[in-house]
Amino acid sequence: MSSQSDQCAATQPRPQSLDNGAGLEPATARVADTAQFEASSAADEFPTHVPLPAYLQQTYWWAYLHPAAVRFFERQWLVNLILWGNFARLRDLALDEIGQSIAGDVLQVACVYGNFTERLIERLAPTGRLDVVDVAQVQLENLKGKLKDPSRIGVYHQDSTDLRFADASYDCVVLFFLLHEQPEDVRAQTVAQALRVVKPGGKVVFVDYHGPSWLNPFRYIMTAILKTLEPFAMDLWRQDITDWLPDRGRAFKVEKETFFGGLYQKVVVTRP
Ligand SMILES: C[S@@+](CC[C@H](N)C(=O)[O-])C[C@H]1O[C@@H](n2cnc3c(N)ncnc32)[C@H](O)[C@@H]1O
């Protein structure tokens, strides 16, 4: 676990370019041009079109797009089962990296089934704020249904490859099991966007699949599951997340840990 001083909760010094205040404006002012809607608003009041990526429609419609899928998967025990009982551990690893008490601005790229976002919100200090983006309206509607208190939470209809936030807007950006779903070119754009919107000194936290050790018995069943259902995920078994960072991450501080016999990883990239 990171020390408190390392965490995103400690608001990073504002970069020179943001000293006009743009970096600390509320989310609505931070958005350049977006299909944003606050949690209490109806999505169709904001008709800006954000197309669904082809991989989502072709490979993941059954998991994220169909309303019945949302009703089926939005169960804490089920998301925990999908991660072989590791959901809470992996969630808390990501959240601990963001902070025990989050005083800064956090961006969550892509919704997550289960209580990831609610637990993140519980950690927001009075000055903390969370924005969540997702490319699927049905997921944003589902998230809104889970939010008990929508104040200080921005919910935005955006694609991770085309974030409509100013450069260096956030103290921390978190991506929980998103990269493995994306084809390689999309994944590289997502990583670049996450690094663009995080402030200098801020962190991008990735939690995702990783190639397990040869001795891990889950290796064999997960090979079958991922090759059948999540074809892009095997990239994360073969390559490091740093492979999709600009210049292979040489300009960044990168910390990587693996868990559950190597099947999962947490990678924290700190922007210089
Ligand atoms: C974070 S991932 C998977 C998380 C985890 N497996 C879970 O239990 O929810 C799933 C989310 O990513 C979203 N997503 C996929 N591609 C996206 C993109 N290009 N931009 C924004 N959101 C995206 C999907 O709509 C879905 O809500």
Image (cartoon, grey):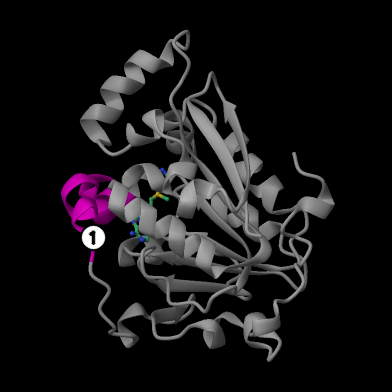
Kind of residue at disc 1:
Pro
What residue span does the magenta drawing correspond to?
A: 52-70
Front-lying residue, 147 or 92:
92
Judged left or right of residue 270, residue 14 is: right
As for residue 65 lying within the magenta part, the answer is yes
Counting the numbered discs, the total is: 1
Looking at the picture, how far across and down is residue 161, in whole percent? 36, 64
The residue located at (37%, 29%) in the rendering is 238
The answer to whether residue 110 shows anywhere in this view is no
As for residue 171 lying within the magenta part, the answer is no
Residue 271 found in image quarter: bottom right
Q: Specify few, some or many for label 1: CA neighbours under 10 Å numbering under 14, 14-19, or 20 or more.
A: few
Front-lying residue, 133 or 80:
133
Identify the residue position indicated by label 1 in the image: 53
Judged left or right of residue 247, residue 60 is: left
Callout 1: helix, strand or loop?
loop
The secondary structure that dominates the magenta segment is helix
Looking at the picture, how far across and down is residue 210, in whole percent? 45, 30
Name the quadrant of the C terminus.
bottom right
Q: Is the shortest distance between ligand 1 and the CB of mark 1 under 8 Å? A: yes
The answer to whether residue 55 shows anywhere in this view is yes
Name the quadrant of the N terminus.
top right
Looking at the picture, how far across and down is residue 166, in whole percent? 52, 79
Depicted 53 relative to depicted 269: above or below = below
The residue located at (53%, 18%) in the rendering is 261
Front-lying residue, 123 or 242:
242
Depicted 261 relative to depicted 257: above or below = above
Looking at the picture, how far across and down is residue 250, in whole percent? 56, 48
Depicted 145 relative to depicted 167: above or below = above
The residue located at (51%, 67%) in the rendering is 196
Residue most toward the bottom? 20
